[in-house]
Image (tube, rainbow, N blue to C red):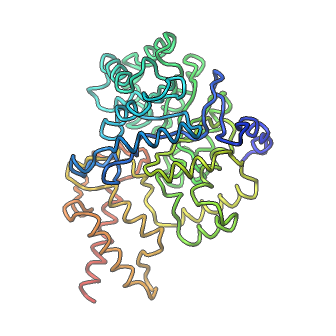
Amino acid sequence: MAQKELDRREFLAGLVGANGGMTYREDLHGNKVSLLGYGAMRLPTCDGGHANNWMKDASSKAIDQDEVNAHIDYALEHGVNYFDTSPAYCRGESETVLGRALSRHPRSSYFIATKLSNFAPQQYSLEACKKMFADSLAKLQTDYIDYYLLHAIGNGGFETFSKRYIENGAIDWLVEERKAGRIRNLGFSFHGDPKAFEWCIEHHDKYHWDFCQIQMNYVDWLHAKETNSRNLDAKYLYETLDAKNIPAIIMEPLLGGRLARFNYAVSAKLKALDPAKSIASWAFRFCGTFPRVLTILSGMTYREHLVENISTLSPLVPLTEHELAVLEEAAVLMLQNKTIPCNLCQYCMPCPYGLDIPGIFDQWNKACVEDRLPVSGEERYAVNRRKFLREYDRAIEHLRQAEHCIGCGRCLSHCPQRIDIPKRLAELDATVAEWRKEERNV
């Protein structure tokens, strides 16, 4: 981290509530926003599964409205006032569920963020964009949106970005909506093609972006390009926004949960800093240490996650230079694992051939994290091999496993992490096939 960032701790401390509660940051208009933001992509469900999961039947994937209400009540009571959703989240149910929960409270007590998630070609027209915005207002039971985003501007490449937002006049129309007060802050979230991000920055003097949402964590800070050469490191994104005085909203502070669970080597490094602190808390404190960060989004499916994250940021204790150095060491160690950079967002779903893509990758990553992947030459090779195959078959139905991927590539443009999904599935399947053969020969 640049020294000038470390020297601004007094700025951070000045935005902590007098009672030692939630830390707040001011947006460009002087609104105080909670440093923890509630992300409504991974809402609690009746069966405890992922709310975006298309693999389950309609009865089991229902969102638990009562539990969402309890989450929102607890969040507001403890200082969280930023709530992020999208028409695309939770199979299209997120805005409606969140609207029901928030409408039980005074409108002035919370900020709503939602998005123009016009991912399908039939949604590109200006008329379709206007309808999506109107539908969001209705579902969220409000007549204005506090923070409105162009959603995932780089997905699908710059040509797609142009069709979604430039050629159809959508950005110019959104600027007019901001002037009319139906949008209070206008920004964009970035995944994918760097050209889309650069275009928005180059046109900042015209559109005056009020904020930008980026993926940032202590792995992606310096190593996003190591995961995928087409990625942009979070350090570059943050510093570019900082230079333009554009507040940053952070998504994936935990990399879809991967920074909350580590193998022994990484966990031991973090626990040595402070045994009382959770593994996840370091990731939130890392993001919060940067003053241009307005809020840090977290999808908190379980109430204990909400409680812990509120505690971590109430108030924020910025990281020291030594702690930052240790997190960098942890990031390097993590990158040595054979994990697949899947954040379980489910954007690749549903697969037209029925594969459970996130589930497959999750099984592999869990095995990597738990140090139980078979490694040639180790005494535990056979035990680990057998355990992985047993867990893989138990969690993923046979017809949804990697061997059934035909390489159609329809998932590629939907992945925010830009994973070569067919290639990784083929590699994983080849490994599983080899291990099954070895098991038969035992």
Place residue 329 in its image quadrant: bottom right
Place residue 393 in its image quadrant: bottom left
Q: Position of residue 39 (x, y in %)?
A: 47, 40
Count of marks, rendered view: 0
Q: Residue at x 31, y 19 (%)?
A: 131
Location of residue 238 with respect to 227 vertically, above or below: above
Q: Position of residue 409 (x, y in %)?
A: 28, 48
Location of residue 213 with respect to 430 vertically, above or below: above
Q: Residue at x 39, y 52 (%)?
A: 344
Q: Report the side of 220 relative to 88 (left or right).
A: right
Location of residue 99 with respect to 336 vertically, above or below: above
Place residue 340 in its image quadrant: bottom left
Q: Residue at x 65, y 50 (%)?
A: 286
Q: Nearer the viewer, residue 408 or 264?
A: 264
Q: Position of residue 99 (x, y in %)?
A: 39, 30
Q: Residue at x 26, y 26 (%)?
A: 122
Q: Position of residue 316 (x, y in %)?
A: 68, 46
Q: Quadrant of the C terminus?
A: bottom left
Q: Report the side of 239 relative to 394 (left or right).
A: right
